[in-house]
Each structure stands twice: as C-alpha cells, then as structure tokens.
Image (spheres, rainbow, N blue to C red):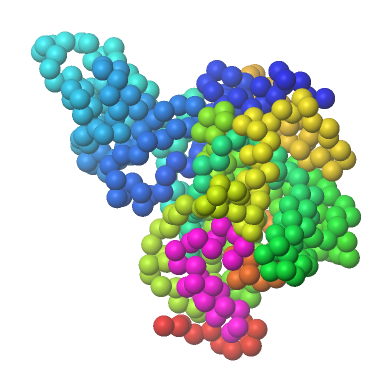
Amino acid sequence: MITESDNRQLTSVMAGTPGGELLRRYWYPIATAGEMRAAWTKRVRLLGEDLVLYRDRSGRLGLIGEICPHRRASLAYGIPQIDGIRCPYHGWKFDASGSCIDQPNEPAGSTFKDKISIGGYAVGELGGLIWGYLGPQPAPLIPKLDGFVVEPAIRMVGQALVPCNWLQIMENSCDPVHTEWLHGHLQEFVEEQRDGIKPSFAISRHHVAIAFDEFEYGLYKRRLYEGQSEDADDWKVGHPVFFPNTLAVGARRDGSRTYSFQIRVPVDDTTTMHYWYNAYTVHPGVEIPEHMLDGVVQYEVPLHKANGDFLLELLDAQDVMAWVTQGPIAKRELEKLGTTDRGVILFRKMLEREIDRVGAGQDPMGVIREPAQNTVIDLHVEYDKSMMSDGMASRLARTQGRYYPHIKELVDLLGVAQDRARAGRPLAATH
C-alpha cells in the first residue's frame, strides 16, 4: 500500500527532495548537436531548474542558471564570448561554472564579481544529443548505450512535452499487459470506427504470462502471448528498462536493425519532455544518402487532433493519453493494483531502494564511472518481436516515426535491404 507521503517522495524531482536527489545522479538529453550548431543559446528546464544552454565563441558548451542575478534579465538572450556569455542588460559575464568573471561597469579592483555565481552544470555529447548533469561532482560517464554509438546509422529523435509526472510514464514501461489493450484492442476499435471494418492485430493476443528480471542497469520485462512457444523472443529475451528513465526496444529484419529508446526527461514535477530516439542500420551493401547520416534529425510529434482530442490512431498518443489522464501526478494512494502490476510494484521498490542508497552517500544503480565499463552497453532485446510482425513500414505508419521528415526514404531503404536479402541477391550500392 503506497501512501500520499510515499507518492510525494517517489515523484518529486526538485532539489533537496529524496526523489530529486536520486534523479540528479544521472545524465539527461537537453538538445541535439544540430540545434546548438545553429543557435547560440537554448532555454532548458530540467528537474525544476530554469537553465540556459549556450555555445561560446570557442565552441564550448555551457549549462548555467538562466537568470542574471543583477537585474534578473534572461541569459537566453546573452552575448557569447570566447570564454563564456554576457548578460544582454548590463554585460555581466559568466563562465561555464556559473561564476561571474567580469562586471564591466564596476570600479577597477572591485571584488564584487567574486561573490556572484548562478550555478553551472556538466555538459556532454553522445549519439548526436547534448546531455546535461545536475548532480554532485565528479560527474559519472554518459552511458554508451548501443544505439547511441552504432555507425553508420540513420538517427532521428521525435519529441513531445507531456503534462504529467515522469514516473507514471516510466511505470507504463513496466506494464507488459497494457499493450494487449491500449495498442491492441483500442487500436482495433479506432480503426473499426474509421474504416467500418474491425482489423485483427497480433498485439491484441492475450498475455498468458509476464515476468520481470533485475539486471545491472535496470529490469527486463518479458511476456508470453497466447499461442507462443516459450522459445519466442518476447518470453526468452524481453526488453529492458534502463534505470531510471529509459525504455529500450528494437528489431532486426533481413540485414537491417533498429535501436529504439524512449527517454523520459523530468522537466518539473508535472511536466516531462519525452524523446523517441531511433537509430537504423541497414545492410552495408545499401547506400544511405548523406543527408540521412548528418547527425540526428529532430522533429515534433503531434499528439492531438484539431479539436484537442488525442490522436488515438497513433500508438504513441495512446500511451500519452493513458499517462496524462491519470492527472499531473497520479494519486497512487487511491490505486487498486492487481497481479499484472508486478512490474510497476517492482519498479517502485527499486526507486525506494536507490533513494536510500543516495541518502547513504552511495552511487545508485546504473551510474558508471569507469571507462572500461562504458565501451558499448549492448542491451539485448527481442528482435523477433510479435508486436512488429505486421512489418516495419506498417508499424512506422502507426507510430511517431511517421513524422520523421525523411520517412519515405527510410521505408524505401529498409525495403531494398529486405527484398534483396530475401531474394538472396548480392547487395550492391543503390543510387
């Protein structure tokens, strides 16, 4: 039984709270590298803190408090310098540590600047994303998950700002049975209303069994559908939740491979930036156009119709509907959990355990400090995935991937690789 007080401890992301201090031990994506090549600054709200990500004239990135302490103007409109950024209002200059290093209109010899700091945080880059870390120093390493480092790869990231707490999004990832209904029977109902014919999807099959296994970096969830053998990847392998905020899935089809991450970035207690990060590799004999290999392509994922209703023909909007309708922060003290909620209960217990570890001065799970542990973290997933059995193109059409600007080219590339592999023909470059 979870109490209202327990719920506050698990869901608060603010500094000084148990949950917020745990979350500050991890890195979070805050921009793409392409964004910061095209702009000098970007406003960032992360873990309840208002920050500005900036690029100085030497090319170095900094992440500091947004508001100048002098007269409270925003540094998002600041003037980049070779070694920091100046406030646009009166020219106070701050470096990447957040220290004030110049006050041009103060008297010569003044030490006033030495008393001024707005806080600065660690910044890193991986997989075409810019990452921020708000925790204590020394900062750990950004985990090199397989999809962030595989090359060559077509990389894309959809994003949506979701008006609810991060935890109810993560709990969805620990709930295998929701797919049978939310993405199965609901999807069938939505398409029946649209087309007048009720389809039948493999994902709607009944769950015979579910299981969960902790591992070094989080937990694996596994499912066995009605009619499946226990040799099926869905049951034998499953897919992982990378603690605390990332779901990993993937697929392999005829020489092509997909690495997919859903990354939930806590903006504040009632808002989450959701990223759908995908990396696609194709058979080396299929030539990928250069513009599809140039970093990460970023795009917004619309979740609503013009009338404000959720776009329920989109699988990802089905998820968001379920998260958001629980309220800004789900009232877990009012829940009536059943036997299929074992994964949700396990994840909450893991959170409580890791909060206690941080309180005891230890690193929580998944924090990596040794480079030898961080070459490539290969997250095994169920490549022969039942819910993807209707084909990659069909699945992309029903997910956020349909909004990728180069979606037609991507589907064509995957089709070429599949056709040639199945025909047993040698793969040559295409033009």
What count of labels does the image hold? 0
Pick whichever, 311 or 220, lies toward us.
311
Horizontal side of 428 relative to 391 (left or right) equals left
Horizontal side of 221 relative to 250 (left or right) equals right
**Magenta run includes residue 400:** yes
Where in the figure is residue 307, as x and y percent of width and height?
A: 55, 49
Q: Is residue 313 visible?
A: yes
Q: Is residue 247 visible?
A: no
Q: Is residue 343 above or below residue 25?
A: below
Magenta stretch, overall SS: helix
Identify the residue at image location x=73%, y=43%: 174
**Magenta run includes residue 32:** no
Where in the figure is residue 199, as x and y percent of width and height?
A: 76, 68
Locate residue 130: give its quadrant: top left
Where in the figure is residue 347, as x and y percent of width and height?
A: 73, 36
Pick whichever, 348 or 353, lies toward us.
348
Horizontal side of 387 relative to 62 (left or right) equals right
Pick whichever, 278 or 377, lies toward us.
278
Identify the residue at image location x=50%, y=79%: 285
Identify the residue at image location x=55%, y=18%: 16
Region of the chain picked out in magenta, as a range: 397-420
Where in the figure is residue 6, as x and y percent of width and height?
A: 72, 21
Identify the residue at image location x=72%, y=69%: 196
Q: Is residue 311 above or below residue 84?
A: below
- Quadrant for the C terminus in the image: bottom left
Q: Is residue 111 above or below residue 31?
A: above
